[in-house]
Image (cartoon, helix red, strand yellow):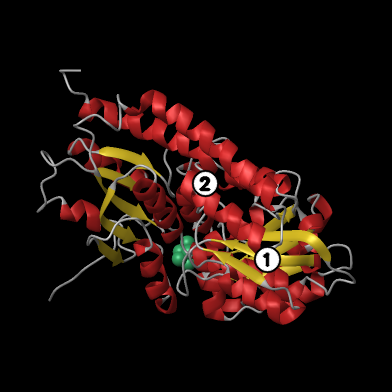
């Protein structure tokens, strides 16, 4: 019998969707899960992911019923109801989000009923079923957003013609989500838009409430949140603009700015001036270093990506279009739904490179390491853009490496971002810092 198993998971299980609730200030997730569930998801999305936690509520204070044997036999909804009532007394929150895991779903606990019994006008209690047997944390993220759209939002009395809601990024699964959204917000404001972002610093429920007022929704990702955008169009008639990546570097940043200027009828002169300014700055710093680094004959030209589609599309566009690198193989590891696979494949091929390269859709993050048993990169060096899981094989084989996705690594991520032209310089700094040990030519 030929047995296979997946290794090196780059997502958490479905209950990891609670991190999307945690990214919304003053939204408290309440877990109706086994005692180990939070530990499981927090390793990938929290501690080993740049040392991240919620800000209003740290991981250590997230309440849970700690579902146990008695609950399996007798049901756990009464204990859940009591926990929610206690949370409403002792936690200062604007919204509560009940999430359940495998055991509660298997025994059929009715979390919808608990949510409706516990909801008060000013303290909404929402629910999202997130059992790991149904999907991973990216699926869980969409369940949490859908819960907000379906259970909480109400039609707006007016539309704000400048307001744009930003979706697509999956907080924590994209380890640089906070810094990226900060930088993106500044760019959108500069262009004359009013960005409405629900995740991160000083956003929270006030911004969630404003979602139905937007002129349009902006989806900056290969496929995530497209379902949410469809739901918002059905419920509130809000159109959406799908831009297939979070730009890194001048080419994609300029394309985003021009796409927005066309779609939202923005001041074209201002848009072009911003593109010019960003490009000038980027190329100034790149010119200063190019001959030492990317022009070095030993710098590896080919690269492998071992990460989710969002990181893969952003990094591939930048590496090919702006750095002149060549894709060798791209592993897409978050379980892209089948209906989106061809679209993501086309997005990855939409680059300034006509040659062949492999694209592999698999949640088995260990395939890259397995490939090193039969492929030798010791002479023909290669760059790897992946996650902390790839550290051991890349160190062993002395390959150049940049972490671009969860689990990002055992470090402090802070406000780090690769977004835009400034972020692209950070990417190049990290790339060279890692490459230096492997590529330095003794002759230079
Ligand atoms: S797979 Fe199920 S039991 Fe395991 S951590 Fe996730 S929700 Fe909990």
Q: How many marks?
A: 2
Measuring 45% from the left and 73% from the top, which residue is drawn there? Answer: 133
The image shows residue 87 at horizontal and vertical percentages of 76, 56
Q: Residues within 10 Å of mark 2 (few under 14, many from 20)?
A: many
- Element under disc 2: helix
Q: Residues within 10 Å of mark 1 (few under 14, many from 20)?
A: many
The label shown at residue 217 is 1
Residue at label 2? 46
Query: Which image quadrant is residue 393 in?
Result: top left
The image shows residue 219 at horizontal and vertical percentages of 59, 63
Measuring 68% from the left and 66% from the top, which residue is drawn there? Answer: 217
Query: Which image quadrant is residue 234 in?
Result: bottom right
Image vertical order of residue 325 relative to residue 120, above or below: above
Determine whether label 2 and label 1 are within 8 Å by CB.
no
Q: 177 and 299: which one is in front?
A: 299
Labels 2 and 1: the sequence-earlier one: 2
The label shown at residue 379 is none
Answer yes or no: is residue 183 visible: no
Image vertical order of residue 112 relative to residue 82, above or below: below
Q: Quadrant of the C terminus?
A: top left
Residue 260 relative to residue 422: left or right: right
Residue 22 relative to residue 429: left or right: right
The image shows residue 353 at horizontal and vertical percentages of 30, 56
């Amino acid at each position: 019998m030929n047995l296979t198993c997946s290794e090196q998971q780059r997502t958490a299980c479905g209950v990891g969707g609670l991190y999307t609730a945690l990214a919304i200030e003053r939204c408290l997730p309440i877990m109706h899960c086994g005692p180990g569930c939070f530990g499981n998801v927090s390793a990938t999305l929290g501690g080993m992911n740049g040392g991240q936690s919620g800000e209003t509520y740290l991981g250590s204070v997230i309440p849970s019923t700690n579902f146990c044997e008695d609950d399996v036999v007798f049901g756990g909804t009464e204990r859940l109801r009591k926990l929610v009532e206690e949370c409403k007394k002792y936690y200062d929150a604007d919204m509560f989000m009940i999430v359940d895991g495998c055991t509660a779903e298997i025994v059929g606990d009715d979390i919808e009923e608990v949510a409706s019994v516990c909801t008060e006008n000013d303290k909404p209690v929402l629910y999202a079923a997130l059992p790991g047997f149904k999907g991973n944390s990216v699926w869980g993220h969409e369940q949490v957003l859908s819960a907000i759209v379906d259970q909480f939002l109400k039609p707006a009395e007016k539309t704000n013609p400048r307001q744009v809601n930003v979706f697509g990024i999956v907080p924590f699964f994209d380890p640089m989500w906070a810094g990226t959204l900060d930088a993106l917000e500044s760019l959108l404001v500069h262009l004359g838009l009013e960005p409405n972002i629900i995740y991160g610093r000083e956003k929270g429920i006030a911004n969630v409430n404003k979602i139905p007022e937007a002129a349009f929704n902006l989806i900056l990702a290969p496929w995530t949140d497209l379902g949410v955008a469809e739901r918002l169009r059905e419920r509130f008639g809000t159109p959406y603009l799908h831009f297939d990546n979070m730009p890194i570097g001048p080419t994609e940043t300029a394309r985003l700015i021009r796409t927005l200027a066309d779609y939202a009828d923005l001041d074209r002169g201002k848009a072009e001036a911003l593109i010019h300014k960003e490009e000038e700055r980027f190329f100034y710093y790149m010119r200063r270093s190019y001959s030492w680094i990317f022009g070095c004959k030993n710098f590896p030209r080919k690269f492998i990506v071992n990460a989710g589609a969002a990181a893969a599309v952003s990094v591939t566009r930048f590496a090919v279009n702006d750095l002149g690198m060549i894709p060798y193989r791209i592993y897409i590891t978050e379980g892209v739904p089948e209906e989106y696979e061809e679209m993501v494949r086309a997005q990855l091929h939409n680059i300034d490179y006509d040659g062949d390269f492999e694209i592999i859709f698999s949640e088995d993050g260990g395939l890259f390491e397995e490939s090193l048993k039969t492929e030798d990169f010791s002479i023909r060096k290669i760059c790897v853009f992946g996650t902390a899981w790839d550290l051991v094989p890349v160190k062993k084989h002395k390959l150049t490496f940049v972490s671009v996705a969860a689990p990002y690594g055992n470090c402090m991520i802070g406000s780090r971002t690769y977004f835009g032209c400034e972020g692209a310089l950070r990417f190049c700094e990290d790339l060279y810092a890692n490459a230096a040990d492997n590529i330095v030519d003794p002759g230079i």
